[in-house]
Image (tube, rainbow, N blue to C red):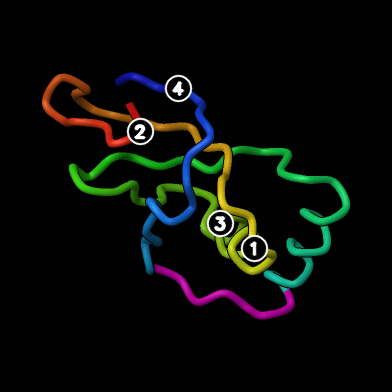
């Protein structure tokens, strides 16, 4: 498996939609992002048309809420030769 960290457009990321998050949790992350910025990248994989979140959906939601356009992400691909990455 290939892993690399890149800055990608938030609009090219889709949530995994497995969880419901408490509003207070997202608000705490919003405050943290405003004060400290993004410290830990989210993890995503490329589906062939967009990126899907594997880990860090709360950070992604908080980033969207404050209006940032990009986010740091670890991009994991099982087989990079079989997929075309829209960021390249």
> Magenta segment: does it hold 4?
no
Stretch of the chain drawn in magenta: 18-24
* Callout 1 secondary element: loop
In this view, 69 is above or below 46: below
* Callout 3 secondary element: helix
Magenta region, main secondary structure: loop
Separation of disc 2 and disc 4 at Cα?
13 Å
Separation of disc 1 and disc 2 at Cα?
20 Å
The residue labelled by disc 2 is: 87
Separation of disc 2 and disc 3 at Cα?
18 Å
* Callout 2 secondary element: loop
Front position among marks 2 and 4: 2
Kindly check if marks 1 and 4 are in contact, taking CB atoms under 8 A apart as contact: no
Q: Position of residue 46 (x, y in %)?
A: 28, 40
Residue 67, label in figure: 1
Kindly check if marks 2 and 3 are in contact, taking CB atoms under 8 A apart as contact: no
Sequence-wise, which precedes: disc 4 or disc 3?
4
* Callout 4 secondary element: strand
Binning the other alpha carbons within 10 Å of mark 4 as few (below 14), some (14 to 19) or many (20 upward) gives few
Q: Position of residue 12 (x, y in %)?
A: 38, 51
Residue 31 is drawn in which quadrant? bottom right
């Amino acid at each position: 498996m290939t892993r690399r960290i890149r800055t990608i457009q938030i609009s090219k990321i889709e949530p995994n939609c497995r969880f419901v998050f408490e509003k207070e949790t997202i608000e705490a992350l919003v405050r943290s992002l405003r004060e400290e910025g993004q410290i830990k990248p989210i993890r995503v994989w490329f589906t062939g048309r967009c990126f899907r979140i594997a880990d860090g959906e709360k950070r992604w939601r908080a980033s969207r809420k404050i209006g940032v356009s990009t986010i740091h992400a670890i991009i994991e691909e099982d087989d990079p030769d079989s997929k075309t990455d829209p960021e390249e």
